[in-house]
Image: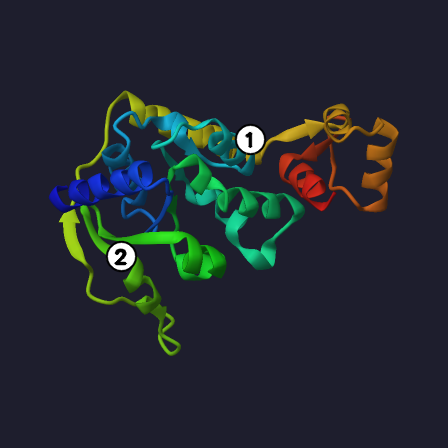
């Protein structure tokens, strides 16, 4: 962590002394330890970093930006990456993009876990907001790229694999364990479970400020997915999310 800590110190100075923000991307294959590295990086920038500063949804992201203090670090976990995919933008996602463009005023460090970031993230974010990229090559080891090197990271048209320039530096980082790591895994599991949860007709009606009759009509017309479970109509949580994003 020698070089990582030195860079984290520079990032902190940039944010606090020069009244700026810093957006960072951590790339890597599934299971290589992206979250572990990004956690270590956030902790190096912001010693008070804790699991509550890790966001999984657009609602959490909006709230975190509005309530964080200058100099704090936020980690956007890969589950929320569609927020930054312009061709998948919804009304809500556009609001999130606008929030991203305002984090400079909050002087925050935002680290985004993004496997295959050139395909997953919006080009505007990569070109205009990102100041550094880290590639986790295997557990415990990372390559670091500065802003001038980011345009040199490309996808080979033939192999469809990434072509990487020589990194600014290579460094290692420790694994995580303990209470805070367990808390993070529990929070992430809660989000995943919620995404596969069900809502009652009354719950949806209350959330969208409509009558239950309207909700039943929407299901009948095919505008809203629903399923009868033990004699009662229910709406999958993902269908509810699609509904509010369309309105």
Identify the element where label 2 is drawn: strand
CA distance separating discs 2 and 1: 37 Å
Query: In the image, residue 36 lies at what x, y percent?
Result: 27, 39
Residue 162 visible in the displayed image = no
> Is residue 119 found left or right of 150 in the rendered image?
right
Q: Residues within 10 Å of mark 1 (few under 14, many from 20)?
A: few
Q: Residues within 10 Å of mark 2 (few under 14, many from 20)?
A: some
In the image: residue 87, left or right of residue 70: right
Residue occupied by mark 1: 194
Which residue sits at x=37%, y=78%?
Answer: 158
Q: Earlier in the sequence, mark 2 or mark 1?
A: 2
Which one is in front, 235 or 11?
A: 11
Residue designated by label 2:
146
In this rendering, position of residue 13 left or right of residue 174: right
Q: Quadrant of the C terminus?
A: top right
Find residue 156 and report its horizontal and vertical position in percent: 35, 74
Residue at the outermost bottom position: 158
Q: Secondary structure at mark 1?
A: helix
């Amino acid at each position: 962590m020698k070089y990582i800590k030195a860079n984290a110190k520079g990032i902190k100075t940039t944010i606090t002394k020069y009244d700026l923000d810093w957006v960072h991307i951590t790339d890597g294959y599934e299971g290589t330890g992206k979250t572990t590295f990004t956690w270590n990086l956030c902790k190096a920038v912001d010693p008070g970093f804790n699991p509550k500063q890790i966001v999984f949804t657009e609602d959490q992201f909006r709230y975190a930006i509005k309530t964080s203090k200058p100099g704090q670090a936020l980690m956007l976990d890969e589950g929320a990456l569609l927020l930054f995919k312009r061709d998948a933008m919804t009304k809500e996602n556009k609001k999130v993009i606008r929030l991203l463009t305002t984090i400079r005023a909050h002087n925050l460090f935002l680290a985004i876990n993004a496997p295959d970031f050139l395909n997953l993230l919006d080009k505007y974010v990569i070109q205009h907001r990102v100041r550094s990229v880290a590639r986790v090559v295997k557990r415990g080891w990372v390559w670091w790229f500065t802003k001038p090197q980011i345009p040199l990271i490309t996808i080979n048209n033939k192999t469809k694999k990434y072509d990487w320039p020589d990194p600014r530096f290579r460094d290692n980082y420790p694994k995580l364990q303990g209470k805070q790591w367990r808390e993070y895994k529990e929070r992430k599991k809660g989000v995943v479970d919620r995404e596969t949860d069900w809502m009652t007709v009354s719950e949806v009606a209350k959330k969208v400020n409509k009558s239950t009759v309207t909700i039943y009509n929407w299901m009948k017309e095919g505008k809203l997915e629903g399923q009868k479970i033990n004699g009662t109509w229910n709406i999958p949580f993902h269908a509810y999310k699609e509904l509010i994003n369309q309105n």
